[in-house]
Image: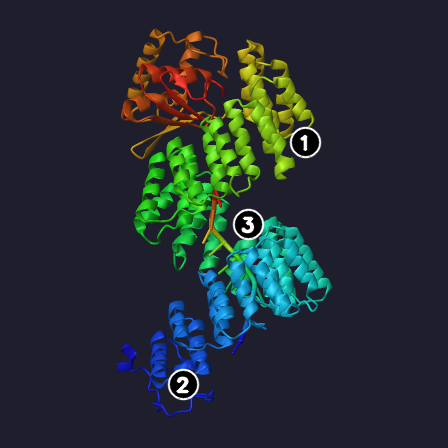
Amino acid sequence: METLSTPLLSLPRYSSSVTVNNDHDHPVFLHLQRCTNPSQLKQIHAQMLRTGLLFDPYSGSKLFAASALSPFSSLDYARKVFDQIPKPNLYTWNTLIRVYASSPEPLQGILIFLRMVHESPYYPNKFTFPFVIKAAAEIFSLCVGQALHGMVIKSSLGADVFISNSLIHFYMSCGDLDSAYRVFMMVGEKDVVSWNSMITGLARRGCAEKALQMFQKMEEQNVKPNDVTMLGVLSACTKKLDLEFGRWVHSYIERNGISVNLTLNNATLDMYTKCRSLEDAKTLFDMMKEKDIVTWTTMLDGYAKLGAYEEARQILDTMPRQDIAAWNALISGYEQNGKSKEALSIYHELQQSKIAKPDEITLVSTLSACAQLGALEVGDSIHAYIKELGIKLNCHLTTSLIDMYSKCGDIKKALEVFYSVEKRDVFVWSAMIAGLAMHGQGKAAIDLFSRMQETMIRPNSVTFTNVLCACSHAGLVKEGKTFFGMMEPVYGIAPELHHYSCMVDILGRAGLLEEAVEFIEKMPIPPSDSVWGALLGACQIHGNVELAERACSRLLELDPENNGAYVLLSNVYAKTGKWDGVSRLRKHMRVTGLKKEQGGSRIEVNGVIHEFLAGDNCHPLSKEIYSKLDEIVVRLKSAGYVPNKSQLLQLIEEDDMQEHALNLHSEKLAIAFGLLYVEASQPIRIIKNLRVCGDCHSVAKLISRLYNREIILRDRYRFHHFSGGHCSCKDYW
DNA sequence: ATAGGGTTAG
């Protein structure tokens, strides 16, 4: 040991004749107390080893506690000290369990506990249990905790308030609220910690209302809340997004003289930003004398999530240390507000600046931005980066990758990721089902759902939305009905509006319009705009004017701004030749100022995203694109193509003008661009913001045959894979 | 010598 030859401290030398057995006031303990760095600790360790003092259980426990609990010592070092102690006493065992329980390896705490029970002469005492129960909570092992609970009762320690409190915390973190409540009720003299454990546990479990009720009861029982209580209460307010109550809590803290620390201020700040009050947040932020990285990040996140990007950027640029969480807050702020391009550009800036290293959270947000944009090449490069760094895929990352590949049109890669991982949670399964659904592989999605049922992973409400969506895209009416019928009785999941909309979509698309109407009439909850929207969509496909008008007016009652409704109804009129209806609608839209959402398509070539709007000539290569488009039309017409104008909103009198408008559709521009610039071996991948129109759909099919190119088109609802003159949707969309 | 907390995430 280097410190043996170069002493940093002048320790008195002890002869081996020193009586160590009862020497509890040995001067070395004073040094241990004053020890401030690892070298000094090592030196004392060496000295004690040399003098044999380490082998006295009491002295050994002192050195061990110092190395285990000091902020500058590592757990590995403490473990080495422990292993040198021949007969650790109960205190030493307890301390080792304690440090493992709050270490990154809490399982070790359980294992040490078992060793103690088997190898040592000691039986766990009232100090042991809180530590080992904490370890069980950390690994979310309900059965381990239950066994410990049993031991507690057998040891007649069931009434100990410290142990009970740790059990409450344990049951809460395992989600067993009933057991937590039972233990809580059994505590005779509930202290503030008993209440805190219930309140924070409930708040974290999403039972915000119950947490607040618990706080109220606590007040009624005249138990004085402390800062931790208020953290729990604030966390409940934040979950409820209840600004008024949050403000009341803030003033309650001030009125009741609760010691305000930095953490409590940070939690209050977070409550204000999450409840969307930037004014309250800013006032508090400016008033806070002490700020840490969490304060800055919380404020940054608040700005970014509420769209105040300049302020968010300002915080990032002025905060004392830009850790990865700060960058993540900015990236996810952009991403969650649909500003994916900005999110990607911040990610690139982060990578270039090397200020902080992207972590899993960065990658999840960035992949989600890629998914929104359909930026396959960027998404691919992130996947490569993950492999390069050897980052192990957790379920979050797996889900994001599957979602990215699915939404970027590469369902094969999505499946590869899915099959490559060992661990799959409900989100991973659901994402894969959704991916297959959007690619029209309804049968495969359903098969996957059956395989999911062979695992222990229980489907949730989102899983069912995706399964029903798969049925809808693949026209699987019978299956859809079966799954919908299973939700409540078999899985205990009450169908929500999403599920009802899917069912209306399934029935309506299949032409069962009457049945869809009956289904809506029998709904136990009021139908939403999306339910009527699904019916209206079905009316468009099947050209049912009377029902379309009914659905449209119900939809507009609920959502008067819904311009999509007019477009759909207009399409129904056009399809059935009711041109007076079309012009009436057009007039109405002009008068009310409602505009059809502009169609736009995107295509990524060599990592650059090119965007096209209907009829735009902003692209630098616009001339070339239009002449390619002319060539395509000539070639298509000679192959027998007749333009289909039924889905044109504008009533244009002259026939060739109509045709011209059709040719300007953004997806056609993007396809022309793709034919020019995407390597022939690669599919042409296009993303459209609206649904693809019937004419563009037939054109894409023909192009795939005449030019022998694969075209993968993502529209608002799903993917269309065109190849050899056919589409994967089998014209069912 | 004992328990309880805040920010970034699908």
- Give me the chain letter of mark 3: A
Image position, residue A17 (x, y; %): 37, 92
| Horizontal side, residue A150 vs residue A607: left or right | right
Residue name at image x 58 percent, y 10 percent: A580
Pinpoint residue A312: horizontal percent, then vertical percent: 44, 50
Q: Earlier in the sequence, mark 2 or mark 1?
A: 2
Amino acid under disc 1: Pro
Q: Is residue A154 above or below residue A562?
A: below
Q: On screen, A648 above or below A211?
A: above
Label 2's element? helix
Which type of secondary structure does the marked residue at label 1 adopt? loop
Residue highlighted by disc 2: A28
Badge 2 vs badge 1, beta-carbon distance below 8 Å: no
Q: CA separation, marks 2 and 1?
A: 76 Å
In three-dimensional space, the C-alpha distance between marks 2 and 3, rounded to whole angstroms, equals 52 Å
* Side (left or right) of A389 relative to A399: left
Residues behind callouts 2 and 3 on a single chain: yes
- Which of A560 and A274 lies nearest the eye of the viewer? A274
* Label 3: few (<14), some (14–19) or many (≥20) C-alpha neighbours in 10 Å: many
**Disc 2 chain ID:** A
Residue under numbered circle 1: A526
**Does residue A340 appear in this view?**
no
Numbered label attached to residue A274: 3
Q: Quadrant of residue A203?
A: bottom right
Q: Earlier in the sequence, mark 2 or mark 3?
A: 2
